[in-house]
């Protein structure tokens, strides 16, 4: 397998901001994507500054083996113009098209737990994004974590209780999630898999045991 080089879409989001320092600490080759209006928030020597709708997106991916799609939105951002269709589905469509042009051989999509049930507008948008990836013809891995957050200050008792929660709904920290995404991207495995609950947590444990 050729050395991996990761194009990170959503590098300025919560997961991306956690993932990038971990990748740099491991001396992994990454190309963090940032929109022009957010360029001042991310200083990285390999960053790609452009809109995903720009015709130069495929060129920005040249030499990358992997696209990591971390972009998504929440209802509280709708007032600024975001929608599930534009942020979750539309960006995935643009990334898939560019990845195929650039010769990328792995697409990693951050989705959400219980997406398969299609309950509500959020889950239905995630379903459409997943379908774009599955139907792309590109080798892929989809991750469906439950809620995630920075829980470094969580009381120890609460953390212990969380460890015994059912895997389908167990909270995952941002660091655990970022390490798992990096592990999947670097190992290029498992391919064609949708990791959720009992299939996700063994990968989390492997990724965080480093």
Image: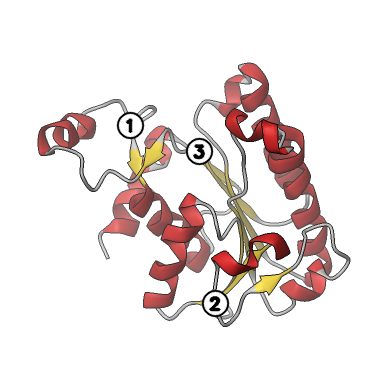
Earlier sequence position, callout 2 versus callout 1: 2
**For the residue carrying disc 3, how many other residues have a C-alpha within 10 Å: few (<14), some (14-19), or many (20+)?**
many
Query: What's the CA distance linking mark 3 and mark 2?
Result: 28 Å
- Residue 182 in sight: yes
Q: Is residue 44 above or below residue 92?
A: below
Label 3 sits on a secondary structure element that is: loop
- Residue 183 in sight: no
> Between residues 166 and 153, which one lies in front from this camera angle?
153
- For mark 3, what is the residue? 144
Label 2 sits on a secondary structure element that is: loop
Residues at circles 3 and 2 in contact by the CB criterion of under 8 Å: no
Query: What's the CA distance linking mark 2 and mark 1?
Result: 33 Å
Query: What's the CA distance linking mark 3 and mark 1?
Result: 12 Å
User: In the current view of this chain or complex, which residue is farthest to the left?
Assistant: 157
Taking the spot 69% from the left edge, 30% from the top edge, the residue there is 125
Instruction: Assign the C terminus to one quadrant of the image.
Output: bottom left
- For mark 2, what is the residue? 44
**For the residue carrying disc 2, how many other residues have a C-alpha within 10 Å: few (<14), some (14-19), or many (20+)?**
some
Q: Is residue 41 above or below residue 64?
A: above
Q: Could you tell whether 144 is left or right of 50 in the image?
A: left
Task: Locate residue 183, reporting x and y percent.
Answer: 43, 62
Residues at circles 2 and 1 in contact by the CB criterion of under 8 Å: no
- For mark 1, what is the residue? 170
Taking the spot 18% from the left edge, 36% from the top edge, the residue there is 159
Taking the spot 61% from the left edge, 28% from the top edge, the residue there is 75
**Quarter occupied by residue 55:** bottom right
């Amino acid at each position: 397998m050729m050395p991996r080089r990761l194009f990170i879409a959503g590098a300025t989001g919560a997961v991306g901001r956690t993932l990038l320092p971990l990748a740099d600490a491991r001396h992994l080759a990454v190309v963090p994507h940032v929109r022009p209006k957010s360029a001042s928030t991310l200083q990285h020597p390999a960053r790609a500054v452009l809109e995903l709708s720009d015709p130069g997106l495929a060129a920005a991916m040249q030499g990358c083996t992997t696209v990591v799609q971390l972009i998504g939105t929440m209802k509280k951002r709708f007032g600024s113009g975001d929608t599930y269709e534009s942020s979750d589905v539309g960006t995935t469509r643009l990334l898939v098209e560019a990845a195929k042009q650039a010769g990328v051989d792995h697409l990693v999509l951050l989705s959400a737990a219980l997406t398969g049930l299609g309950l509500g507008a959020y889950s239905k948008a995630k379903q459409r994004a997943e379908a774009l990836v599955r139907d792309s013809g590109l080798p892929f891995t989809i991750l469906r974590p439950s809620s995630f957050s920075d829980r470094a200050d969580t009381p120890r008792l609460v953390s212990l209780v969380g460890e015994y929660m059912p895997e389908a709904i167990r909270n995952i920290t941002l660091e655990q999630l970022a390490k798992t995404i990096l592990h999947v991207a670097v190992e290029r495995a498992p391919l064609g898999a949708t990791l959720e609950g009992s299939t996700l947590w063994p990968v989390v444990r492997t990724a965080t045991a480093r």
